[in-house]
Amino acid sequence: MTVAAGGNAGATVTKRLALMAMQTQHPALNLRGWLMVVIDLLYPVRCGGCSDAGKGVWCESCNDAVQQLYPPLQTRQLALHAPWEAIAIDVTSAARYAEPLRDGIHAFKYDGTPALAGPLAQLMVEAWVNGGLQADLLVAVPLHPRRKRERGYNQSDLLAQRIGAQAGVMVDTKVIRRVRYTDQQALLAHDERRNNVHGAFKAESARSNGKHIMLVDDVFTTGATLSECAATLLSAGARRVSALTLARAG
Ligand SMILES: [Zn+2]
């Protein structure tokens, strides 16, 4: 649907009217066309970064303003907690968690704009290529089923699906699941985050055994969630765990 794909709202309406002029022979198509025009006029697409209307869900100037990270700065080591404290995982982040990306991620997660997955995943694909990243499997940090129902989608999974398609790596949504409903990490103090996610995940040994798994998440802040997921996957037999996030705070 053009509403989700973005584009200039005025041009979209004009295109629709032109299309409908060709479809006047068919009353059903005609009615549907008129309904789409009304939807476009009532709900103009706004950019998730700057809220400007008529430039798509993610406009060119916001995309240009993203503070992208490049090797070697795009990758940081994250130390895991016991019993994996001897292991540090590579966490690669596509950009700094700053405006306009911060607003874009907020719109993507909380304002019900799943169409942002396309342009935001593109930044992660660039980080993947620039960093020469490799993995056997891409695995999104899972949401609890209740949270996924509330939100309608797992934003990290939408990113993983697009990265996987472009990087040619399989995405497995059944490797790890969240078995405990937790408070949102973003609402907690940094020292509370590890306790909040402790024991929150369960991994499938049959799917993770011997694999190099690349976790995919939206924001890398304290790393408490990534650390807990990585420890869970290593316990289930994963050979190696790395992570790719869209943004990194700090
Ligand atoms: Zn914008």
Image (tube, grey):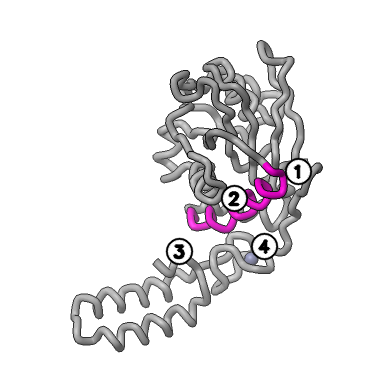
- Dot 1 crowding, Cα within 10 Å, few <14, some 14–19, many 20+: many
Q: Quick one: SS at disc 3? A: helix
Q: Is disc 2's CB within 8 Å of ligand 1?
A: no
Q: Amino acid at mark 1?
A: Gln
Q: CA distance from mark 1 to mark 3?
A: 30 Å
Please state, as top left, top right, bottom left or bottom right, where the C terminus lies in the image: top right
Q: Amino acid at mark 3?
A: Ala
**Residue identifier under label 2:** 106
Q: Amino acid at mark 4?
A: Asn
Q: CA distance from mark 4 to mark 2?
A: 15 Å
The residue depicted at 59 percent of the width and 63 percent of the height is 58
Q: Earlier in the sequence, mark 4 or mark 2?
A: 4
Q: Is residue 171 magenta?
A: no
Q: Quadrant of residue 183?
A: top right
**Residue identifier under label 1:** 74
- Of circles 3 and 2, the one toward us is 3
Checking the image for residue 4, the label placed there is 3
Q: CA distance from mark 1 to mark 4?
A: 18 Å
Q: Is disc 4's CB within 8 Å of ligand 1?
A: yes
Q: Earlier in the sequence, mark 4 or mark 3?
A: 3
- Dot 2 crowding, Cα within 10 Å, few <14, some 14–19, many 20+: some
Which portion, as a residue range, is magenta?
113-132
> In the displayed structure, does residue 88 sit left or right of residue 155?
right
Checking the image for residue 128, the label placed there is none
Q: Is residue 181 above or below residue 99?
A: above
**Residue identifier under label 4:** 63
- Assess whether mark 2 and mark 4 are in contact (beta carbons under 8 angstroms): no
Residue 173 pos. (x, y %)? 45, 35
Residue 236 pos. (x, y %)? 52, 17
- Dot 4 crowding, Cα within 10 Å, few <14, some 14–19, many 20+: some
In the rendered image, is residue 155 in sight? no
Please state, as top left, top right, bottom left or bottom right, where the N terminus lies in the image: bottom left
